[in-house]
């Protein structure tokens, strides 16, 4: 059983977020903390300068609200939305928050993954804790 579980959430087809949440709940200890984390890729500064002031913060809070509503039936899952590179940010968040297991959904690897690597593959290689990959 794990005490501090991180579930990265991506809004992509082929990623089974709800299955990841169910697995996290199944392997969680009695007083475990489960955090659903969504990472928004950073907006380049040359684009950000054309956005209305506060737009990025508004988007972060809006996504957090959507996730909170989507996961409301799953009890006390914490929701966190951050900016950054998905693979690096997930690993960094896990290290900073002393996560002991990451449950991450992954798609079937394709040819492009041989050259670029998927987020799940990067997390598996660099995570400071156990990683459970859901397909």
Image: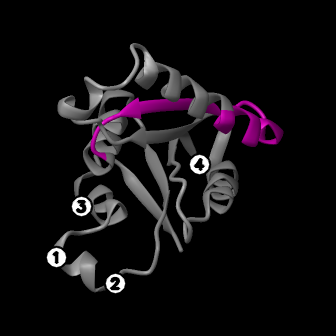
Residue highlighted by disc 1: 115
Q: How far is the residue under mark 1 from the one under mark 3?
A: 15 Å
List x then y, in percent, for residue 119: 33, 60
Residue highlighted by disc 2: 110
Q: How far is the residue under mark 2 from the one under mark 3?
A: 18 Å
The first of marks 2 and 3 along the sequence is: 2
Image side of residue 10 versus residue 49, left or right: right
Image side of residue 116 versus residue 4, left or right: left
Residue 11, labelled with which disc? none
What is the image's colouring? one colour
List x then y, in percent, for residue 124: 31, 61
- Residue placed furthest toward the top: 53
Residue highlighted by disc 3: 125
The first of marks 2 and 4 along the sequence is: 4
Q: Residues within 10 Å of mark 2 (few under 14, many from 20)?
A: few
Is there any visible trace of residue 53 in the rendered image?
yes
The local secondary structure at tag 3 comes to helix
Q: Are marks 1 and 3 in contact (CB under 8 Å)?
A: no
The local secondary structure at tag 4 comes to loop
Q: Which residues are magenta?
A: 66-85
Residue positioned 55% across, 54% down in the render: 11
Q: How far is the residue under mark 1 from the one under mark 4?
A: 35 Å
Q: Is residue 2 above or below residue 13?
A: above
Q: Is residue 47 above or below residue 118?
A: above
Residue highlighted by disc 4: 1
Q: How far is the residue under mark 2 from the one under mark 1?
A: 10 Å
Residue positioned 30% across, 26% down in the render: 50
Q: Is residue 125 above or below residue 128?
A: below
Number of labels in the image equals 4
List x then y, in percent, for residue 37: 50, 39
- Work out whether residue 53 or residue 116 is closer to the camera in this orientation and state it: 53
């Amino acid at each position: 059983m794990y005490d501090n579980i991180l579930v990265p959430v991506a809004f992509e087809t082929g990623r089974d977020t709800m299955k990841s949440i169910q697995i996290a709940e199944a392997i969680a200890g009695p007083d475990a903390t489960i955090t659903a984390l969504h990472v928004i890729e950073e907006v380049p500064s040359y684009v950000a300068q054309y956005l209305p002031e506060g737009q990025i913060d508004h988007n972060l809070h809006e996504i957090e609200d959507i996730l909170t509503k989507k996961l409301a039936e799953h009890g006390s899952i914490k929701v966190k939305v951050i900016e950054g590179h998905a693979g690096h940010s997930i690993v960094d968040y896990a290290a900073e928050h002393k996560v002991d297991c990451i449950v991450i959904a992954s798609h079937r690897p394709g040819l492009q993954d041989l050259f670029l690597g998927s987020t799940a593959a990067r997390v598996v290689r660099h995570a400071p804790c156990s990683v459970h990959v859901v397909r």
